[in-house]
Every structure is written in structure tokens, then in C-alpha cells.
Image: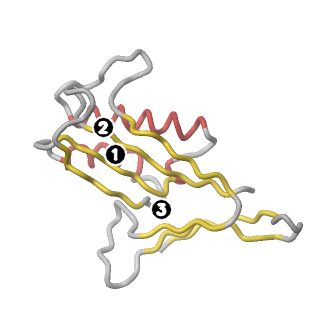
Amino acid sequence: MSTSYQQAENIHGTKMENKKKHINPDGLFKSPAFSQIVTTRGNGKTIYIGGQNAVNANREIVGKNDLALQTDQVMKNLEIALKACDATFEDLVKLNINILQGQDARKGFEVSQKYLGQSSTQPIVTVLFVAGLVNPDFLVEIDAIAFVPEE
């Protein structure tokens, strides 16, 4: 279990501890790829990132028919969104991953580890196989929640 701590002043001017805590309790499966539970407490910024797909800044679909290439573009899009909010993958709390039915999720997982594998903490993750996404060429879509404690 790993925890990130930071201090902030509460409305009364006294120091209050801001915490983002990743918990993997005994009795639940422990994975290096995700946490079972994440709690946040204290002052900070919660970031909600809408579903990202494999469309780049030029409105082109990257990696048609290739889950690995599409996942790489999705992770790049998430990274851009996080940076726009002064956050990193380290600040992720939750990922919701939707993969088109029939795809090999392991290919997407391998690519995502380039981005998430360097983190000292892992977000909680929900993965669903879906019958379709908004564009028939999309193979994966990921939305995210991050938390950045105030300094």
C-alpha cells in the first residue's frame, strides 16, 4: 500500500493533511497494474476527464484496426488532458476502460503500462467489453478521474 501526503490550510488557518491513499487490503487480489481502493481527503482539485478515444489533434483516427496503436493514442490524449490541469498519471484515481468486444485486452494493457507502469501508485480500474463505441472504427475509449492535493 502506498500513500501520498500533502499539507494545506483549512478555512480556519490551521494545517490540515491532504491525502490520496491507495489501499490493497488483505483478502483482495493484489495487482501491480491497479489498486483495489483509492480514497482522497482534504483540499485539492478533482479532475474528471471525459472518454478519450484514438483521435489526434488533427481529428484523425490513429491505429485503425489496431488496439495497441489506438491505446497508445488514448494514453497520449489522457496525458495531454492531465498536463492541462497540472496533473500527471501519478495523480490518477480511477480509469474506466471500454474495449470493443472481440479485441485482445492484453494488447491494450501492454501499451498502457508505458504510461502507468512508472507510477508508484496505480488507479482503480474498471474494464468493460462493449458491443460498440460511437464510431465503428474506435476499438477503445477511456475516461479518468484524478486528484491533485493542494500544496
**Dot 3, how many residues are within 10 Å of its Cα: few (below 14), some (14-19), or many (20+)?**
many
Percent across and percent down for residue 91 are 54, 53
For marks 2 and 3, give the CA distance. Answer: 20 Å
Percent across and percent down for residue 135 are 25, 27
32 or 105, which lies in front?
A: 105
Left or right side of 25 for 138: left
Identify the residue shown where x is 21% and y is 24%: 64
Residue at label 1? 112
Residue 12 found in image quarter:
bottom right
Identify the residue shown where x is 37% and y is 45%: 114
The numbered mark, 2 or 3, whose residue comes first in the sequence reads: 2
Residue at label 2? 71
Residue at label 3? 121
Residue 14 found in image quarter:
bottom right
Amino acid at pointer 1: Ser
Percent across and percent down for residue 95 are 40, 52
